[in-house]
Amino acid sequence: MKSSQKKYVYLFSADFTEGRADMRDLLGGKGANLAEMSSLGLPVPPGFTISTEACTLFYQKGQQLSEEVKDQVKQALAHVEEVMGRRLGDKENPLLVSVRSGARVSMPGMMDTVLNLGLNETTLQGLEKKSPRFAWDSYRRFLQMYSNVVMGVNGSLLEVKLEDYKHDKGYTEDTQLTVEDLQTLVKEFKQLIVSFAGRPVPEDPYDQLWEAIEAVFRSWNTPRAKTYREINHIPEEWGTAVNVQTMVFGNLSESSGTGVAFSRDPSTGERKFFGEYLMNAQGEDVVAGIRTPLPLRKADGPESLEASLPDVYKELEHIYQKLEKHYRDMQDMEFTIEDGRLWMLQTRNGKRTARAALRMACDMVDEGLITPDEALLRVDAESLNQLLHPSLDPQAPKVLLTKGLPASPGGASGQIVFSSEDVVRKAAQGIPVILVRTETSPEDIEGMVHAEGILTSRGGMTSHAAVVARGMGKCCVAGCEDAVVSYDNKTLKVGDRVLQEGDVITLDGSTGEVFLGKVPKVDPVLDKYFERFMG
């Protein structure tokens, strides 16, 4: 790279890393932390970050990648290929990458991601050598993501095709799909994509790469990203970085998986390792709430990572302790296990409830991790306000409807509503509402803002609904598995009971309970952490 040339691309790998944690303005939060984790010697798949300055340049050039940026990307990619011993587009041993956004501050699920980039008819053959089912499953996922994120094909079109196919076959899980099933689906997906986008997904991996990078830069200005920025007072001129990283595969085998972990409980602030994982899955499966995941620790459930892969669990425990000590704050981490080997994909300061923020601030002072002055800066005035909101009256009579996971504490009553648009419409009329979804997606952000509370039938404590609700201080109950949501009929069915849109329910985000009708509230009880903090 010529020295006079402006630098837009920064490498991170075990042998050579150009970024640091304090470069988040330039590399975004994700890119800066990937570089820092690489420097700490943690198992991070190699890759590179395209800076926020390249995002500004992209918009200056009429939403086009400049040749200068492309040249630097090619050089960085050549380094990654050398480190991995694989080539993008190679038939025998293909390199596949993920292309992910990374703003200065975490914007969970608000911007776009493409996984398994580099797959086409040719590279599929190289992947089939590892496992035919894994190869076709990865291809199916790539077509779904790429067509939606890059080509603007409505994601639900392919999702409905997949669900209908599973229903016809009598399958309940994606993992039941055979190689033949996946081949049929890929063929049907390709036809659907051409009929809706007017063109197929590009076969050339470099065409895929350029289009994906541009799509991630463009996602900075999607309606949902703009809404999130407004709520969280994030300046528009910041832009996003793009991270291109070697793919590691949680869907490769039964000893592969993916998960999300927190170094402390984000709901309560308790000093205990907390998280969820899914075997034979890719990263988006956990946060999207498509399957309800399993806990990491034996103490949180009989089926756990600690029980099934004790060595991986021990390594993960060691890493979270190292990261929390290094960053001196609660960490939210993403990881993938490929054939029993642990890889770290992300770490960031975790979103937490106001109650958790108070407890963590006090505990970390006692542990000597931070000073009292730093503790005061860890809790903002808006979140203190959350603690002063009333909670459900424990003495009031209640009729239990169902129970899910206590994803974000608080109490909320309102009319059942099934779409974000309807939430916004009813909230504008002053009607309190509860947003009820099978699982939320980034498109639901506006509805989540205006709803009193959120209820999902799928997803765990680290799903999109749970993470975003906690960040907003919004009551949320996730993963009510016996609740059946029908968008077509606008009904919520639990056992023999069927509730219609407009019926009133109450959520207790601290216990995960859902009650019929409106439950009265009482003034909050402020704990010792609140008193100490205010003192």
Image (cartoon, rainbow, N blue to C red):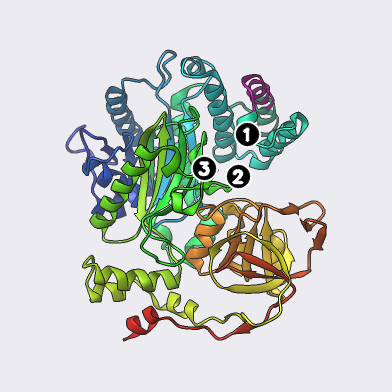
Which label belongs to residue 290? 2
Instruction: From the image, tell me which residue sits under label 3.
Output: 284
Q: Give the side of residue 26 with respect to residue 143, left or right.
A: left
Q: Viewed as shown, does residue 500 lie left or right of 256?
A: right
Q: Is residue 179 magenta?
A: yes
Which numbered disc, 2 or 1, marks the residue that appears first in the sequence?
A: 1
Residue type, numbered disc 3: Glu
- SS under mark 2: loop
Tell which circle, 3 or 1, labels the residue nearer the N-terminal end: 1
| Mark 2 or 3, closer to the camera | 2
Q: CA distance from mark 2 to mark 3?
A: 9 Å
Does label 2 or label 3 sit earlier along the sequence?
3
Looking at the rendered structure, the kind of residue marked 1 is: Asp
Left or right of 407 on screen, residue 412:
right
Asked if the residue under mark 1 is in contact with the one under mark 2, i.e. CB atoms within 8 Å, the reply is yes
In contact (CB < 8 Å): disc 2 and disc 3: yes
Where are the magenta residues, as a range? 177-188
For the C terminus, the quadrant is bottom left
